[in-house]
Image (tube, rainbow, N blue to C red):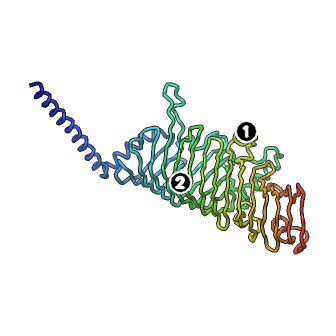
Amino acid sequence: MASLRRSRALRHTAWGVGGVLLGVALAFLVLNLFARTRAGHARILEYTLNALARNVQGSLDVQRISGNLFEGARLYGISLTEKDGTPFVLADSADVTYDVRTLLSPRIRINRLVLYKPNIYVRRSPGDSLWNYQKIFRDTAALNPNRPRVQRVTFVDTLRVVNGFTRVEIPWAPDSTASARAQREEVRLALRDTSPVIVRRVRGGYLRTINMTGLGGRLRQIRFSPGAESGSRITIDTLRGRVQFFRRPADVRHVQGTIAILPDRVEFDAPVLRLPASRIATSGVICTKNDTQACGRRVPQNELPYYDIAFRSDTMAFRDLQWMYPRFPSGAHGKMSLFLETRPEGTLFDIRDARFTAPGTRIDGSFGITVGDTIVFSNVDVQARPVRVSTIERMLPEGLPVRGLVLGSATIRGSGVAR
């Protein structure tokens, strides 16, 4: 009798478990079907955006979605703005697959993301200590001591960008050590269309603009955590586009490497950088705050952003560097190491161990060019065979008094030669 009761109990339990599983399966099927309908899309989109918006100090909007939302979706009309409506991210559309269990947690995992025509605006206004993305994703829990501190981070396994645009704007100021008259003249020249850098007047001061257009490529192992000291990190499989670092753009055909976006600086290492006729390896630091630890020295506000970048190349065409210094001869090519650094007197282009041919001559050696209010050649140790003065003349802003002279050979050494 006892065994019979146990058998009945087991059957009832089995039926009960089976009923629960069947109910869960039916519920999942209903939700799955509902998630594919237009009404389901609207309801789930509204719920998800409301939940995500609680972690954003701004406005997040998606006009429409399609797809099976339990696995992934296509989003249309994406907009993420600051509280005053200033745009941070605008995108035509995006394809996304994700781990649905993480979407409402502090640690979101996206398996695959494709952004179509994204426009990204990164900005730090005069007088601000935070970038716009740091404000948008600021952890408000830190302001409330009664709430537990949870680090928010988004992981993206792979990201593909199609025809992207990025604008970076950072405060600019004239040399604070110069006289008031000299500062006014520096501002006047910086605001002209012929200025090597793009500067505009805004409320409270001036902004320098760096544009990146036609961006396309694939990124992976993205860790986006702007509120953390460890910052955000990206691995670049391939990326191309036009970079308007100075007013004249650089045509970047392929980049491969890593980048770290930290609170006070950007660090990067790109062993592969291809320009139209050059193959380069580069690494460096771009400091965005006058922080001694980040930059290695105290950097005045008017020198920011501070650059300390190294380029190495066995296949270098100088026409690919004319975005930095337009007077580099178009026909020169060879190999060299180039170090770019911000100095109080201007931007230093320190060329070392160069071996290149230019029109009518071959040049070996090292020299520095500081581009500021004046052009200064420094640490010159160059051999030329033969010396073609016209080639050197075209590299100088005002030319030389002797034109067209060709000498058999020459060795030039010196420091602090200004033009």
User: Disc number at residue 320?
Assistant: none
Query: Does residue 8 sit above or below 86 in this rendering?
Result: above
Side of 294 where 219 appears, left or right: left
Q: Which of marks 1 and 2 is nearer the N terminus?
A: 2
**SS of the residue under disc 2:** strand
**Which residue corresponds to mark 2?**
219
Which element type, helix, strand or loop, lies under badge 1? helix
> Looking at the rendering, which quadrant does residue 252 occupy?
bottom right
Quarter containing the N terminus: top left
* Whole-percent x, y for residue 16 in the image: 19, 35
From the image, tell me which residue sits under label 1.
Answer: 292
Numbered disc total: 2
User: Dot 1, how many residues are within 10 Å of its Cα: few (below 14), some (14-19), or many (20+)?
Assistant: few
Q: Residue at x 54, y 55 (%)?
A: 119
Side (left or right) of 260 relative to 179: left
Q: In which quarter of the image is the C terminus?
A: bottom right
Return the x and y of residue 224 as percentages of the image width and height: 53, 44
For badge 2, the amino acid type reads Leu
In the rendered image, the residue lying farthest to the left is 1
